[in-house]
Amino acid sequence: MIPIPKGVSRVAQGVVVVVLLFCFSLNLPAADTPVRVQLDMKKAAPRAVESLTERTILRDYRLAWTSMAQALEFNTSDPLEGPFAGEVKRQLLETVTKQQHSGLSQRYVDQNHRLEAVFYAPEGDVMELHDTAEYQLQVLDGSKIIHDEHVVMHFVVLMTPGADRWVIRQLQAVPQF
């Protein structure tokens, strides 16, 4: 327990606790392995991708994979609330629930994504991307790693703009492009 000097208000004590929890969360294993994304927009059609949209897609795609990794490693649905929508969100929530019941979890380490835009709707309301994702997948039983493998996966991704970010509406694994 951290001693708090006399005269410090309850609100200030609460702020100290939140700051300490935030600092602790920065040291979690998932935070030590940043998600790397290379984005190629050259083949996007029929509409050209604006530079601001390109930066936003890059930021939001990286955030989505970081959030998914945290949700699956720590068996919590909270990180899935912003970056995912629709069926993909439902599937991820179901996976978290199943893991909670089994005591297993998944860890995604050294994520590298080669993301290519292949379709950008004329109205700017949907973008299709192809992702070649490469990462180390670890399955854990509690804190013990029971499976560890290098994975290369291909995903067809549909993203749509939300209120303050682009969200992933589809994340479908495919054998190849």
Image (cartoon, helix red, strand yellow):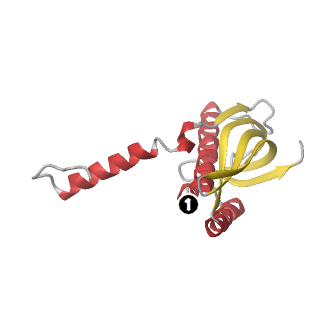
- Residue 28 placed where, x, y %? 50, 44
- Residue 95 placed where, x, y %? 68, 63
| Residue 105 to residue 97: above or below | above
| Residue 110 in view | yes
Of the 4 image quadrants, the one containing the C terminus is top right
* Residue 89 picture quarter: bottom right
| Residue 49 to residue 108: above or below | above
Q: Give the residue displayed 14% in from the left and 49% down from the top.
A: 5
* Camera-side residue of 8 and 60: 8
Quickly name the residue at label 1: 76
Q: Secondary structure at mark 1?
A: loop
**Residue 86 placement, left or right of 150:** left
Q: Give the residue displayed 78% in from the left and 29% down from the top.
A: 42
- Residue 73 placed where, x, y %? 60, 53
- Other-residue count near label 1 (Cα within 10 Å), few / some / many at <14 / 14–19 / ≥20: some
Q: Give the residue displayed 30% in from the left and 52% down from the top.
A: 17
| Residue 119 in view | no
Q: Residue furthest bottom?
A: 101
**Residue 75 placement, left or right of 156:** left
* Camera-side residue of 81 and 122: 81
* Camera-side residue of 39 and 25: 25
Number of numbered labels in the structure image:
1
Q: Give the residue displayed 16% in from the left and 55% down from the top.
A: 9
Q: Residue furthest right?
A: 176
Residue type for callout 1: Thr
- Residue 101 placed where, x, y %? 63, 70
